[in-house]
Amino acid sequence: MDTDSLRLFVLAADKLNISAAGRELGLAPAVASARLAKLEHALGADLLHRSTRKVSLSLEGAEFLPYAREILVQEEAALAALGQGQAMPTGTLRFTAPSTFAQLYIAPILPKFLEQYPGITLDLRLSDSRFDLIEGSFDLAIRNSALEDTSLKGRKLANDHRILCAAPSYLEKRGIPQTPEDLLSHELIAFADQETKPLRRRDGEIGSFDPHKARGRVILDDGLSQKLATIAGAGISSNPVWSVHQELKSGTLVRVLPDHEVADGSVLWMIYPKTNVLSAKVRVFMDFLIEEIGKSPVWQTPV
């Protein structure tokens, strides 16, 4: 199979623009269109839907895209084994991460990464709503949860301890919970899809953080908004330490039930679709994130 045509198809699928994909590979628009048509004829399937206004992936194209990426990665690895690979990684890396984590820790270090790897373009999707890695054709994602999907692989970035927090003004007004059962009479802030979370005390005793049973709730879908609502005194929320460690140091937020932690097995994972060989662009970005963030997480300083 012609890997140059596969590379053109992958670029066109990423950009949803055949002409732009062709220009990146030094091809005139007519030549790029003809090469894609030849690939589709060889495969016996339309990979892209074309109209005068836009280009979109066909169902067959969406199913074929992960395999096309895998073939290109395997070619890259084979050439590298022979000493014929590119000296520096290149290409577009599609990456998704929780928006709050990205704002605090990833966005500030992007200039350093781009300076080190000028051939890589980062296509970022930053949201606390999760994207499907396979359907979205993402190369890499950061997830703060247990890794359960068997179609994905993961590499640990850092621990993700979670605690309960509230503003001093809220606690002065509503009182300080002494046990997990006391939370039922408080205002709890939570994500719309948040399940009941176990709370483990240092001696091993288990309680729970259950927004669905609380007297009052604020439901959000964004981590930064949850933190800001908590600071404003809207209630008690469950937060990763990486999100609130500065506010805990300054006293803007206070730990609630300080002898308890949320015991849901959550870890900050860098996850990617299963593949026999990691592409160079993904490998160097993962190494960079570990060096800059995971090696000595700033939020692990005791509070």
Image (tube, helix red, strand yellow):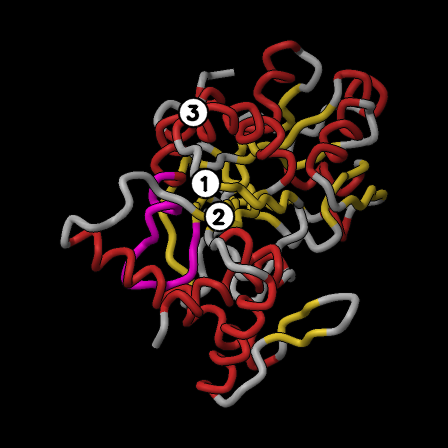
How crowded is the residue under tag 2: few (<14 C-alpha within 10 Å), some, or many (20+)? many
The N terminus, quarter of image? bottom left
Taking the image as shown, residue 61 lies to the left or right of residue 87, namely right
> In the picture provided, is 185 more to the left or to the right than 245?
right
**On the image, numbered disc 2 is attached to which residue?**
93
71 above or below 125? below
Which of marks 3 and 2 precedes in the sequence?
2
- The amino acid pointed to by label 2 is Leu
Name the side, left or right, on which 189 lies relative to 143.
right
Task: Tell me the distance, in whole angstroms, between the alpha carbons under discs 1 and 2.
Answer: 7 Å
Asked if labels 3 and 1 touch by Cβ distance under 8 angstroms, the answer is no
The residue identified by callout 3 is 297
Question: x%, y% of residue 40?
Answer: 51, 82
Report how far apart the C-alphas of labels 2 and 3 lie in the structure.
24 Å
Rounded to the nearest whole Å, what is the CA distance between mark 1 and mark 3? 25 Å
Residue shown at 54% from the left, 40% from the top: 262
- Relative side of 163 to 189, left or right: left
Label 1, on which residue? Answer: 120
Q: Name the element at disc 1.
A: strand
Q: Amino acid at mark 3?
A: Pro
Is residue 179 inside the magenta stretch? no
| N-term mark: 1 or 3 | 1
What amino acid is labelled 1 in the image?
A: Ile
